[in-house]
């Protein structure tokens, strides 16, 4: 039985999109979604703490808020990936 990528008398043709490149793209996308908001909001909290002399409360609030934002972004990405694979 032949598959759609098979050619007569030759090896099958490779897919248009490399699975490895797609996986690396998803990994990079997940990485910025996880660490970007946490680092950014923690940094803003640390900066605000240094100016308002409220250390470490705003930095901790930044980490907590950044974690919530990261969780929402990851959930959106998982929904997008699930929708892609459900097709």
Image: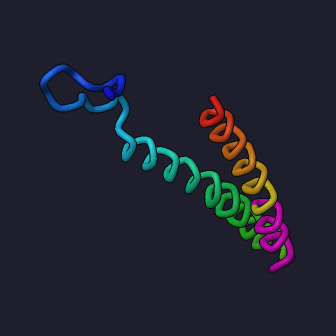
Is 46 located above or below residue 9 in the figure? Answer: below
Q: Quadrant where the N terminus lies?
A: top left
Residue located 26% across and 25% down the image: 6
Does 57 appear in magenta?
A: yes
Residue located 39% across and 42% down the image: 19
Q: How is the image coloured?
A: rainbow
Q: Left or right: where does residue 85 sit relative to residue 16?
A: right
Q: Left or right: where does residue 26 sit relative to residue 47?
A: left
Q: Position of residue 14 (x, y in %)?
A: 27, 32
Q: Quadrant where the C terminus lies?
A: top right
Give the quadrant of residue 76: top right
User: Which segment did they paint magenta?
Assistant: 54-66
Q: Position of residue 78 (x, y in %)?
A: 68, 46
Q: Nearer the viewer, residue 31 or 64?
A: 31
Q: Nearer the viewer, residue 87 or 8?
A: 8
Does 5 appear in magenta?
A: no
Q: Considering the whole magenta stretch, tell me its main secondary structure.
A: helix
Q: Position of residue 40 (x, y in %)?
A: 67, 58
């Amino acid at each position: 039985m032949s598959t759609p990528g098979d050619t007569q008398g030759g090896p099958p043709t490779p897919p248009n999109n490399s699975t490895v490149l797609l996986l690396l793209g998803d990994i990079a996308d997940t990485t910025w979604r996880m660490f970007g908001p946490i680092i950014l909001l923690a940094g803003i909290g640390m900066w605000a703490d240094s100016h308002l002399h409220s250390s470490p409360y705003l930095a901790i609030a930044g980490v907590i808020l950044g974690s919530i934002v990261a969780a929402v972004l990851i959930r959106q990405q998982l929904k997008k990936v699930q929708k892609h694979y459900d097709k």
